[in-house]
Amino acid sequence: MGSERIIIINNIEETEQLAALLSNRLEPGYTILLTGDLGAGKTTLTQNVGKYLGVKRHMTSPTFNIIKSYHSPVKGCTVHHMDCYRLEDSDDDLGFDEYFNDESINIVEWPQFIEEYWPDEHLDINIEYVDETRRKVTLSATPSMSHIVEELYEKFTD
């Protein structure tokens, strides 16, 4: 892994700010692996990223579908939102490797359950519950995406 940075998010507005900064840096072929406890804010961050990518439909957690796909007019690509929570004890091959390509942006909640399918290059975001409004966000990435971690940290802590 490349660099690791920690950001404290104090409220929902700062979550939206982080999503705006992140979405500006996303390109087709990028994968975000989102980890954190239930209720930490993974889906909220995803929804805000979708908003800034121009996704018209509300991005809900695809718990029962596992994968939902949306169009991003801003980036001109498909955004795949995956929620792998139900796959904890599953050996099903749902074709994940087909989604991780150079033409789409992927946001994966509970990625630890499909680790064998992760692309070589990805951005890791771990969200931890601090209290009712605050979250600790740990950003890390594989070397080719580590510049995003540094840019987000610099912009957010400015």
Image: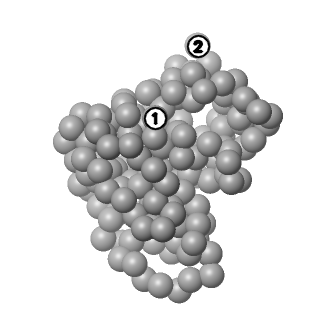
Can residue 133 be seen here? yes
Identify which residue, 40 or 103, lies in the foreground. Answer: 40
Of the residues shown, which amino acid type is indicated by label 2? Asp
Pointer 1 or 2: first along the chain: 1
Q: Secondary structure at mark 2?
A: loop
Q: Amino acid at mark 1?
A: Asn
Residue 143 in view here: no
Q: Is residue 15 left or right of residue 122?
A: right
Residue nearest the observer in this picture, 122 or 104:
104
Residue ID at (32%, 65%): 99
Is residue 17 shown above or below 42? above
- The image quadrant where one finds the C terminus is top right
Residue 94 spot, x, y in % from top left = 40, 78
Q: How dense is the environment of label 2, judged by Cα within 10 Å: few (below 14), some, or many (20 and up)?
A: few
Question: In x, y percent, where is residue 50?
Answer: 38, 39
Percent from the top left, x then y, of residue 111?
55, 63
Query: Which residue carries the number 1 mark?
Result: 48
The circle drawn on residue 17 is: none
Tell me the number on the disc at residue 158: 2
Q: Label 1's element? A: helix
Q: Position of residue 42 (x, y in %)?
A: 58, 46
Of discs 1 and 2, which sits in the foreground?
Answer: 1
Query: In this rendering, is residue 71 above or below 82?
Result: above
- Disc 1 to disc 2, how far (Cα)? 21 Å
